[in-house]
Image (cartoon, rainbow, N blue to C red):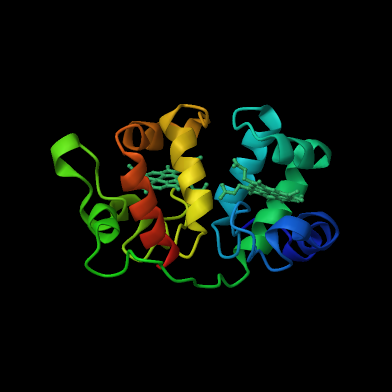
Amino acid sequence: AAGDAAKGQTIVTNVCSACHGVDGNSVVAMYPKLAGQHPEYITKQLMNFKSGDRKNAIMGGMVAALSPEDMENLGAYFGSQTPKTDTAKSNGPGSIGEKIYKGGIPGIGVPACASCHGPAGAGIPVQFPRLGGQHSEYIVTQLKAFGSYERANDGAKMMRMIASKLSEQDMAAVADYIQGL
Ligand code: HEM
Ligand code: HEM
């Protein structure tokens, strides 16, 4: 990636680590893990927060002081960190969560998550984010935000169609499965 990870690390240590962890493996479920995420995806989300295309009160404040170069450096740093795995509470192998992730819900036109986010949740650079090991609570929050069109940044178009078809039960099941990936 274009960014300078060492410069990104300085900002993370001083600012972002309070919520996302020093190595991007946040421990609090409402703060997303960023370790191992594609640098380009991170940079783009930061630009989306800054332009207001993705709205969040906390992150809107965080990006105010960041330059485009800082955003690339932050992407490079978080992307170079090793993601910590987690476990699913009840949606392991053979569960409804796995079924949705790997096969979608054909009857209502929900495609398989794996087709864009990868069978092991690693995502596909640069457009499709890594999801594996992410906190299920954060995932459910994002699925609801896509479904209600509250998260309406450019890349979110594909997700809006999908999430608006998922019930709360579907969201909880697939998010739990993803947490365990
Ligand atoms: C989301 C980066 C500081 C709380 C995000 C995302 C990125 C990011 C890239 C989107 C993740 C994704 O789409 O998977 C950063 C950077 C920071 C920083 C580079 C330092 C400059 C903080 C701090 C807090 C925080 C200090 C807590 C006070 C959150 C929350 C979200 C988030 C709550 C989820 C927003 C939503 O629901 O849309 N952050 N963050 N961040 N961050 Fe930060
Ligand atoms: C983003 C879940 C299927 C394309 C996301 C995010 C979640 C998610 C939670 C936000 C990640 C974050 O904030 O860190 C799911 C689930 C799926 C699914 C549970 C299956 C039910 C798909 C499919 C596609 C896709 C089939 C491609 C056609 C994308 C893209 C983004 C995204 C492009 C990034 C949006 C942006 O740029 O802000 N997905 N996804 N997803 N997903 Fe999916």
Q: Residue at x 66, y 59 (%)?
A: 76
Up the image or down, 127 lies above or below 157; here it is: below
Is 106 drawn above or below residue 125 in the view shown? Answer: above
Left or right of residue 164, residue 81 in this image: right
In the image: residue 68, left or right of residue 146? right
Q: Nearer the viewer, residue 181 or 47?
A: 181
**How many numbered badges does the structure rendering display?**
0
- Residue 67 visible in the current orientation: no
Q: Residue 99: percent from the left, percent from the top?
A: 22, 57
Q: Residue furthest left?
A: 107
Quadrant in which the C terminus appears: bottom left
Pinpoint residue 46: horizontal percent, then vertical percent. Answer: 66, 42
> Where residue 103 appears, x then y in whole percent?
20, 53
Relative placement, left or right, of 49 versus 41 is right
Quadrant location of the N terminus in the rendered image: bottom right
User: Residue 78's quadrant in the figure?
Assistant: bottom right
Query: Residue at 77% of width from left, 49% of height from top?
Result: 70
Q: Is residue 39 at all visible to an observer of this figure?
A: yes
Q: Nearer the viewer, residue 82 or 32?
A: 32
Q: What residue lies at 31% left-to-right and 63% top-to-bottom?
A: 119
Please give the name of the residue rendered at 82% of the width and 63% of the height, measured from the top-left corner.
Answer: 13
Answer with the quarter of the image where residue 2 lies: bottom right
